[in-house]
Image: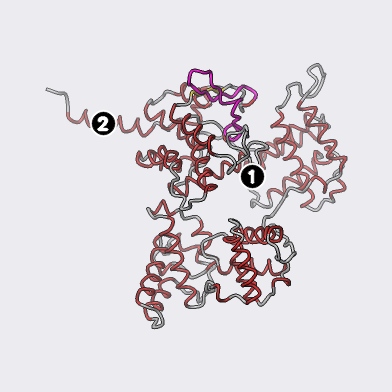
Amino acid sequence: MTLQNPKLFDLAFIPEGTSMFSDLIAIIEAAVDLTETRRRDMISGLRRVAKALGRPPQDVPCSSLWLQPRLAKIAPAALNLSLKSWQNAVSDARAAMAHVGIVEHRNKTSDLSPEWAALWKIALASKNPTIRPSLSRFIYFLNGLGVSPESVRDEHSRAFYAALVHDEIRKSPIKAHRNAIHAWNLAVKLIEGWPQTFLILESHRNIIKLDEEALPQSFIRDLDSLMARLGAPDPLAEHGPTRALRPSTTAQYRRLIIRFASELVHSGIDAGEITCMGFILNPVMAERGLRQMLSRTENKTTKQISRMAELLRSVGKATEQPDAGQEVLVKLAKKLSLPPQKGMTRKNRDRLRVLQDERQARRLLNLPERLMKNGRTGKSDSFTKALAHEDALAIAILLICPVRIKNLAGIHLEQHLQRPGDGRVFLVFVEDEVKNEHPLEFELPPDLVCMIDKHLAGRSPTLCPMGTPWLFPRRDGSESVDPNHLSNRIAKRIKNELGFEMNAHLFRHFAVMKWLEANPGAYEVARRLLGHSTVSHTINVYSGLEIKTATKAFSELVAIKKKGPHK
């Protein structure tokens, strides 16, 4: 039996008769209605896109549904291409597909009806930075359908999304649709004469967790009472927990329990039946909810499912459920438990392997300075520059102070950046702010301090109001940025600028990897750098990271031994 190329398994569901890029190249080469230059550009675009996908043109289908998720993952920097060069290549490939009718041609201003042309002229005159780039395709789409401005309704929004799915080969249809509807509703508010019809943005996500309002208030009260007790237990109580949980922990438990109640509803239980914590801790209900979660993972336990089962066991004990019920919860938790993580995950090891290349590591280390000089953003507006500077600061701090993303996002200018008055600046987190309650303190190097001060001097009002006390604030300055949002920004910035995957937490691994490469076995310093409670935990996670240095030293020893003793 001949084994097929694994790369081609993802072509199994491409409809029979779908043209490949090689077919398209042959058609373009023979096209008499194209200039020589246009033929060359289209063919070059097709070949370059195929090369970026790691396939010959004959293995790349002319299918928007197949191309879009794959091209969306490609970072031009990884191909040593500028963003503009890559955009031109994709545009030329798309133009070739449009030339033979696979996707629609882009519209021109002259295509608009007089009614739409007049309205769009007013929109462009507003010079709003959101409306023009986000709304134009929707306007041309509506015009092409023959829909007048006053007749636009939600069904046209849904039709636009369907068209994007069929027509878009690189950008996310979901994101393009969301941006267009937001821009339309913004135009309703800001542009005089715009049709006063707000469009509903329907979610494309499969949402599991229900709103609290969908659950009985008696259940919510019982849950809140439990969380309050876990957050401030009676130390002299005969039964129940005596150690207080941190507010962040109780908030997390609360979210997980509401999600589990939602799982029960999705399994067919009427929400009105979930009147108290005892209902979801009933062994029958606990198993039913866990089976509902397993139904989405092909009956394979995951970290999330294992964690939920363990939480049910813990809460069952804290609420003193009947012994028989607690025994069942313990058994469920054991059946769904995962073996403890030994060392680093394979995904993180693979990502770190890229950074074992000294050239790539230097690119990462030098990225903050390059971004502070505006980097490769490709735009010149003040907001884009300020945002690049803010991302540069986040990356620069993580390179020197490998803290968790929650601590990074919550840096307060007075509370966490302490300046004793001698020119030095310290980044300080006290016990209550750190995951394992071990305080952290870093002295910031002068160049990083200069970067921070320069950014703070020029960020308002572009990024936040004057006097905002957070280093990474929400745009209204009311509080610090959401950690997940900042983490996603950092990952996206590095992918776009450097071409490889690097999330915020990976900076901690990167720091230890570089330290152990230079100092094999020096785990105590690594422990202090990361703020781990015990050195054994540090060794468990990072053992083996210095193997490159160790194996190199051993091979050099073997080479020396082969030569024999010196004479």
Count neighbours of disc 2 (C-alpha within 10 A) and say few if under 14, some if 14 to 19, many if 20 or more.
few
Q: Percent x, y for residue 122?
A: 63, 65
The quadrant of the rendering that contains the C terminus is top left
Range covered by the magenta-colored residues: 406-432
What residue is at 37 percent from the left and 78 percent from the top?
35
What residue is at 71 percent from the left and 59 percent from the top?
202
Q: What's the residue type where badge 2 is placed?
A: Glu
Dot 2: what SS?
A: helix
Relative depth, front residue between 55 and 556: 55
Q: Percent x, y for residue 285?
A: 80, 44
The quadrant of the rendering that contains the N terminus is bottom left
- Foreground mark, 1 or 2? 2
Q: Residue furthest left?
A: 567
Q: Residue furthest top?
A: 236
Dot 1: what SS?
A: loop
Q: Residue under label 2, please give it.
A: 556
Q: Percent x, y for residue 362?
A: 37, 38
For residue 154: magenta?
no
For residue 419: magenta?
yes
Q: Percent x, y for residue 509?
A: 48, 34
Q: Residue furthest bottom?
A: 32
Q: Residue under label 1, please give it.
A: 301
What residue is at 40 percent from the left and 59 percent from the top?
85
Q: How is the image coloured?
A: secondary structure
